[in-house]
Image: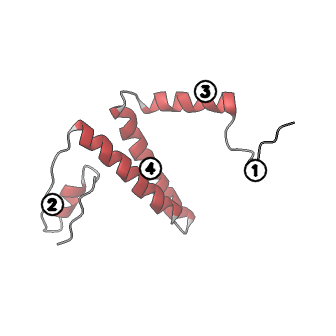
Amino acid sequence: MPIHNKLVRDRIPEIIKSTGKLADTKILDEEEFVTELRRKSKEELDEFLNSETNEEALEELADLLEIIHALAKVHAASFDKVEQIRLKKAEERGSFEERIFLIEVLDE
């Protein structure tokens, strides 16, 4: 049997059981959970970066968004709070709508 040693979505053990297999799992403490969420975010970002179709990209973005929701909770905030911060930063510094690529900053 393959060893995964990774954070999975809540229903994955149930889905594995429905295939006639057993999932060996444990519940993480808060510190372990944050560490594994961070690791999972890297995994999902890599999968997004390696996606080849719009459909695959959207699937991976949805996974990243799920992780962001979970990370907001462990940092004692709601996703709405994260969104408020995002909107404030977009207002103050802009977003990425104009596709600006900074090459260099020169002294005048």
Label 3 sits on residue: 88
Expressed as whole percent of the image width and height from the top left, the position of residue 17 reads: 15, 62
Q: 95 or 38: which is nearer to us?
A: 38
Amino acid type of the residue tagged 2 in the rendering? Ala
Write down the quadrant of residue 13 in the picture: bottom left
Point out the frontmost of discs 1 and 3: 1
Residue 17, numbered circle:
none
Q: Kindly check if marks 1 and 3 are in contact, taking CB atoms under 8 A apart as contact.
A: no
Query: In screen coordinates, is 55 left or right of 39?
Result: right
Query: In screen coordinates, is 11 left or right of 73?
Result: left
Residue 23, numbered circle:
2
Q: Kindly check if marks 3 and 2 are in contact, taking CB atoms under 8 A apart as contact.
A: no
Within 10 Å of the Cα at label 1, are there few (<14), some (14-19), or many (20+) other Cα atoms? Answer: few
Count of marks overlaid on the render: 4
Local SS, label 1: loop
Amino acid type of the residue tagged 1 in the rendering? Ile
Give the Cα distance between marks 4 and 3: 21 Å
Q: Earlier in the sequence, mark 4 or mark 1?
A: 4
Which residue lies at the image location 41% right of the left edge and 50% below the top edge? 41
Label 1 sits on residue: 103
Give the Cα distance between marks 2 and 1: 50 Å
Expressed as whole percent of the image width and height from the top left, the position of residue 28 reads: 20, 44
Point out the frontmost of discs 2 and 1: 1
Colouring method of the image? secondary structure
Amino acid type of the residue tagged 3 in the rendering? Lys
Expressed as whole percent of the image width and height from the top left, the position of residue 88 reads: 61, 27
Write down the quadrant of residue 105 in the picture: top right
Q: Residue furthest front?
A: 107
Label 4 sits on residue: 64
